[in-house]
Amino acid sequence: MDDTGALLITVTGMDRPGLTARLCETLDAQGARLLDLEQVVIRDRLLLGLLVSPGVEVEALQAAVLAVGHEQGVEVTVEPMAARRPRASGPRHYVTVLGQPLRASALAALTGRIAELGGNIDRITRLSRYPVLSFEMLVSRAEADALRVGLSDEASRQGVDVAVQPADLYRRAKRLVCFDVDSTLVQGEAIEALAARAGCSDRITAATTAAMAGQADFATSLHERVALLAGLPASALDEVRSELRLMPGARTLTRTLKRLGFQLAVVSGGFTAITDELCERLDIDFAAANTLEVVDGHLTGRVVGPVVDRAAKASFLESFATRAGVPLSQTVAVGDGANDADMLRRAGLGIAFNAKQPAREAADTAISVPYLDALLFLLGITREEIEAADAADGTPLGDD
């Protein structure tokens, strides 16, 4: 569209109902043609920009919109615009920034880094004020790999989280989310809670830590740890299950995703005694985990069937996607340990949640805040949209 001779009308001041309508009526009466429109309201303060083709009577148009500003008690400026430069044909990306806190100095460093990488910020949108402050920036011109590496390094220095995703249709087409369970969907590790009852906490905790960090083969480690639980009453599984707590934000996350038509899955190196009940509570569609052998009411110290290890997790992600009728490009995987790395790498979007280094290196992005519903912001969903949906169906505030 030709915008030669266009005027940019900028309106600032207290927002009030009918102001935009009044301005548009005035523009139409003056024969102006609307080319573009942007509006932002922050704490009842308005910033409104209208790009118009004025027609013939530029001075009359300017006088008319200034009169509307005086009438409405807002400040109006009118300035001529040069012909629009052709939009760069390079890639566009969404850059999501999360922090608790998110300091102005951190934003300054990140936006400065974007500029150094040749990127231009076309738009900034606030996604949430709590439990974290988060913003989404639409960035053009910069290359994806350069953005990810440069912003990841800067985010680490600033103590915030940054995600870079292509600004395309597929970002909003994710339809299956697959979660690790221990230390991701729930707080802590179920096997460590069982170890406390079996009197072998130190040995199992050390072995679990090594396995999650990728310092030991997961399947071998699991067999060794489960062997230490031999003789433990099966009732201990019920006790641990009742004591486990969901990760903060887990209910909000899963509830919101289900409203949007997502299918949900869990794939755990833990145990079906935990995941079965979790699936019922959170309306999970698909699940895979290890089964502890129980004989005469006691754990035998053995696992029934093959172990759900690193390779199996990735394989289950693929099979769940097939069953859900969803291509891998439209899947999200969330995990924290080395045994999640292949799954994170294979998903359309891999998210390392408060993760060990092997998982962080495999994932597309990492979140270090302790709120699982922060994942929603990476999908472009705002806190206001989440709360409005909860209010519409009567979900109590703070249901997590």
Image (tube, grey):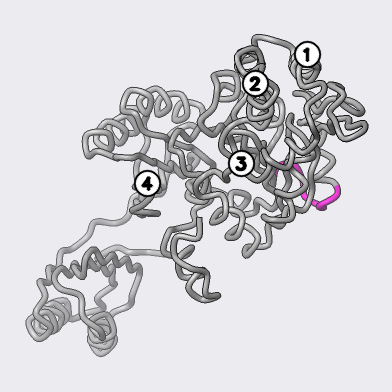
- Residue 338 numbered mark, or none: 2
According to the picture, the residue beneath numbered tag 4 turns out to be 132
Residue flagged by tag 4: what amino acid is it? Val
Q: Is residue 362 left or right of residue 288?
A: left
**Which one is earlier in the sequence, the residue at label 1 or at label 3?**
1
x, y percent for residue 77: 12, 68
Quarter of the figure with residue 114 = top left
Q: Are marks 1 and 4 in contact (CB under 8 Å)?
A: no
Q: Is residue 253 above or below residue 92?
A: below
Q: Nearer the viewer, mark 2 or mark 3?
A: 3
Helix, strand or loop for disc 1:
helix
At a point 48% along the width and 31% down the height, the residue shown is: 143
- Residue 348 numbered mark, or none: none
**327 in the magenta segment:** yes
> Along the line of sight, which residue is nearer the eye, 292 or 250?
292
Q: Is residue 181 above or below residue 138?
A: above
Give me the C-alpha separation between circle 2 and circle 3.
22 Å
Residue flagged by tag 3: what amino acid is it? Leu
> Along the line of sight, which residue is nearer the eye, 144 or 257?
257
Give me the C-alpha separation between circle 1 and circle 2.
18 Å
According to the picture, the residue beneath numbered tag 1 turns out to be 224
Q: Which residues are magenta?
A: 323-329
x, y percent for residue 169: 60, 53
Q: Are marks 1 and 2 in contact (CB under 8 Å)?
A: no
**19 in the magenta segment:** no
**Which one is earlier in the sequence, the residue at label 4 or at label 2?**
4
**Counting other residues with Cα less than 10 Å from the Cα at mark 4, is it few (<14), some (14-19), or many (20 or more)?**
many
Give me the C-alpha separation between circle 4 and circle 2.
26 Å
Residue flagged by tag 2: what amino acid is it? Ala
At a point 17% along the width and 70% down the height, the residue shown is: 11
